[in-house]
Amino acid sequence: MLSDAIAVARVGNASPKPAADGLGVHFAHFCEQLRCDAALGEYGVQSLVHRVIQVQSLAGGQVVSVRAQWNGAFLRGAYAAGMTLIVLWDIDHTLIDNAGVSKEIYAAAFETVTGARPAKPAVTEGRTDRLIMRGLFRRNGVDEPEWPQVETALAEAGEERREVLRERGTALPGVREALKEASVHEGWVSSVLTGNIAANARVKLAAFGLDGLLDLPVGAYGADAEERPHLVDIARRRIHRDRGLPIDTPVVLVGDTPRDVEAALASGAHVIAVATGVDSPSALAAAGAPVVLPDLADTDRVLRRLEDVERGENVPGTS
Ligand SMILES: [Mg+2]
């Protein structure tokens, strides 16, 4: 008698990962059949009857997760045609140059909730919006208001600066091409891991037409946690739940600060650092980044590095 199980089959890899009592092997056949006819219903596989309860697939059909009944037990799993990878991009100074608009958003939100302009500016450096605003209140000698009030003020301030961001800011070199390639790569989910609240992340990306190149609903944002490392597991779980990728799918963060690097190292993720922010390549390497790129301008190079991670290779050294 089988108990509830999670089976993960990766057809195209060397072999399916076994779950319980060889269930993974059965599941591989099961998934192959689903690929041809991914619909709810009953399927006979090796003389066993499976009832499919729920099917999820990505556009293009490369990844399918299923929930099914198997000899009275429930079987859930994910099917991926080939290897899989989760790519999570930081936004500020990795994808875009916000030209100081971010700090204006923090100052405006501060003014909205306190009634006064801050005497001292926000300090960002890869922190989440929650921590940036807490620091701003503290440095200016103000008690920290409730977070929902702060988040609303941040979102309003961001929305009001959509046009000025478009005028003064820019997408960084190669970003559009890199995001485009990652978004269509078979088996990959490409989203964001950012300290920005979700509303402002969308404003910043949409200002430069980048929002449609990312799977934003499964990203992790500054309201989701205070500390950046905690955002990695939040994105990982969202992608497992909503996109069907196995929970142990390799994750790679792409970011410009030591905090991006530290978030990856603390959460079992890989990291590709880009020196398009204030931190030098040597500072990023010193933080532990095995790969530091000068920028994202060379699309082939970026893709090669991501594919290295997918294959389990993350070659040390600046290159
Ligand atoms: Mg950044």
Image (spheres, rainbow, N blue to C red):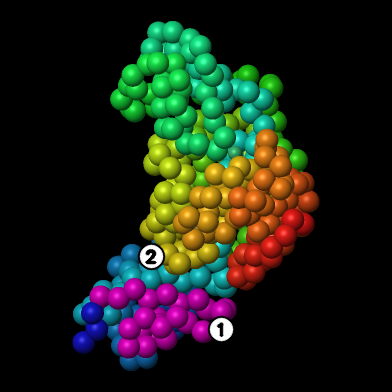
What is the spatial separation of the Cα atoms under label 1 and label 2, in whole angstroms? 24 Å
Residue that carries the numbered disc 2 in the rendered image: 55
Q: Earlier in the sequence, mark 1 or mark 2?
A: 1
Is residue 34 in view from this perspective? no
Asked where in the image residue 149 lies, by quadrant, the reply is top left
Residue lying at the far bottom in this picture: please name it.
47
Residue that carries the numbered disc 1 in the rendered image: 14
Q: Quadrant of the C terminus?
A: bottom right
User: Which stretch did the figure color magenta?
Assistant: 4-27
Whether residue 207 is situated above or below residue 85 in the rendered picture: above
- Please give the name of the residue rendered at 72% of the width and 47% of the height, measured from the top-left corner: 281
Residue lying at the far top in this picture: please name it.
116
Asked where in the image residue 227 lies, by quadrant, the reply is top left
Disc 1 residue type? Ala
Determine whether, in the image, residue 303 is placed left or right of residue 67.
Answer: right
Q: Nearer the viewer, mark 1 or mark 2?
A: 1
Residue 81 or residue 254, whichever sits in front: 254
Callout 2 crowding tier (Cα within 10 Å): few <14, some 14–19, many ≥20 = some
Q: Is the Cβ of the residue at disc 1 closer than 8 Å to that at disc 2?
A: no
Residue 248 or residue 122, whichever sits in front: 122
Residue 280: x and y in percent read 71, 42
